[in-house]
Amino acid sequence: MTSAPLHNEDDGVSAIVSEIQTQLRTRVSAEIPVEPGTHITRDLGLDSLAIMDFIFDLEDSFDISIPMERIAEVQTVADLAKAISTLRKEAA
Amino acid sequence: MGIFDKFADLLEQTKTLSSFGQSPAGLKFEKILSPTEAMLNGKRTILLGTNNYLGMTFDEESVQCAIEALKSEGTGTTGSRVANGSYNGHKALEEDIADFYGMHTAILFSTGYQANLGAISALAGRGDYLLIDADSHASIYDACRLSDAQVIPFRHNDADNLNRKLKRLENEPGSKLIIIESIYSMLGDMVPLQDFVDVKNKHDNTYLLIDEAHSLGVLGDKGRGLCEHVGVEDDIDFITGTFSKSIGTVGGFLVSNHKEMDIVRLASRPYMFTASPPPSVVASARQTLSTVAAATDKRKQLWENATQLYTGLKNAGYELGPTISPIVAIRLQDPEKAIALWNGLLEAGIYTNLALPPATPFGWYLLRSSISAAHTSEQIALAVELCTKIGVELGLITLSNSKKANIELVSVKDETKPAALNGSSEKRPRAKAEPKSAALPKADGSAARA
Ligand SMILES: Cc1ncc(COP(=O)(O)O)c(C=O)c1O
């Protein structure tokens, strides 16, 4: 699984996870847990359009663009956080 | 386990859809009577969802040209132009397209889908960036999969969002190709083109491609589309288009003022590895295209018809797309009622398109119609009346909502009679009660954001 421990060489990944969790909380119903291991397309009851909208918001929060092929590799919240962390480093 | 197992959900969905009546993807017209009428299940049916904007599918001269080409050059080319050579007609049609747009080079493709696939995948290569509108047509998304470029979607019609994304790419050496559409095919909303041109012009090594599929023949004094209408043709790098809508046949093209264009042919797989359009198709495309610039009356009629349908449905209380356009879409939340409305209209003799998520924005269920210059105002009035009647029955709209409920909901008459006057002739009679104005969109496209 790709949702491996986050804290080894953290690189701010856990801060990114919290931001993702905050943004997802406004979109999914309260009883659905949003954890690092949560599968974004499967567990949250969001359709592809809602996910796209969520990604656009994240891009603005982190001032990065997430190319489609990166999104394709993402399954969990933790995957997404890592992808964002990598993109931020590339942009720096 | 088997190869078809993966379709279980899809199969379930189509079964559910057809359990309410007709199967939206499986209609079969027994006979096409005119650009606006066909026989369906033994009933004369008004076609209100065929993208036949100028009503040219039965144009006598176009038909005649096709017949002559069939006789003199045969039924097909049996190969691609790269492998088997071009016919005179292919070259001539490309010159016609380039002349029509006043641009340097046009490349002909076998369909509009392939034009997008072939243009976008060839122009944006490894190391380049494709910036595409999130609501792009499937042909654009598929082109992205065929391209080796990185694909970055931006928010629908949001030039500021695009601008931020281009800024982040400022130090990247690759070329940036922006992809937009003039009129979006689901809701009929328009791109705020001037804003996008301004953003493009702010960035180096950045190009703009616009798909004018739904605006060729529809917008602009000479029918060249939204770029002409807005007056920004000099700022556009590439235009793609199709002959399957206003031109009434099949085929697609890429046209541009860039002098290096010809080489794209040899880098474009959807150009190289498929058979070229047959002579009859090329001949009718040439004939119809030659009439587009002067078809001002048809364009005026088209926009009057669009206005009549849009205002009729709006007054009835329906939620529609943001702006009057030849694509008029009723937005519905409840799938069962959307399907019931679509079926009810079919039973009453009106054919529209049912568009479902995820192909639609915001997960809406859309009853999508497209208007033609060949529709009569009687046909449109009948469509509005039936939409109102059935919508009230289904509880989609209420009579108090519908200001025009004074169209006293005359119940549908004898269904064996022609639903309305045949709309195939240009000289058809028109009712006196014309809509007041043929509201064209504002030149800056701002109507799209209304
Ligand atoms: C925006 C857009 N582009 C391209 C196409 C493809 O055109 P064609 O039917 O010629 O393949 C369509 C039609 O479905 C379209 O709506």
Image (cartoon, coloured by chain):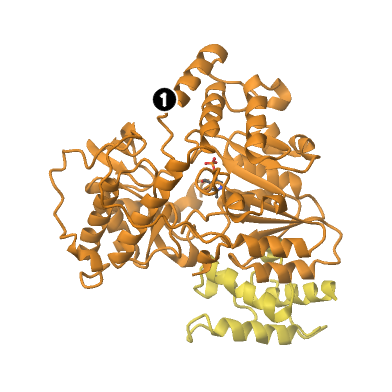
Foreground residue among B318 and B10? B318
Ligand 1 closer than 8 Å to label 1 CB: no
Q: Quadrant of residue B256?
A: top right
Residue B377's x, y, as percent? 29, 47
Q: Is residue B230 left or right of residue B272?
A: left
Q: Position of residue B217 (x, y in %)?
A: 51, 43
- In depth, the one of A11 and B113 nearer the eye is B113
In the image, the chain rendered in orange is B
- Residue B347 makes an appearance in the image: yes
Mark 1, chain letter? B
Q: Work out whether residue B27 or residue B292 is closer to the camera in this orientation and state it.
A: B292
Camera-side residue of B447 and A34:
B447
Give the quadrant of ligand 1: top right
Q: Position of residue B391 (x, y in %)?
A: 25, 62
- In the image, B65: left or right of B370? right
* Residue type highlighted by circle 1: Glu
The residue where tag 1 is placed is B60
> Residue B376: which quarter of the image?
top left
Element type at mark 1: helix
How dense is the environment of label 1, judged by Cα within 10 Å: few (below 14), some, or many (20 and up)? Answer: few
Chain A is which colour? yellow
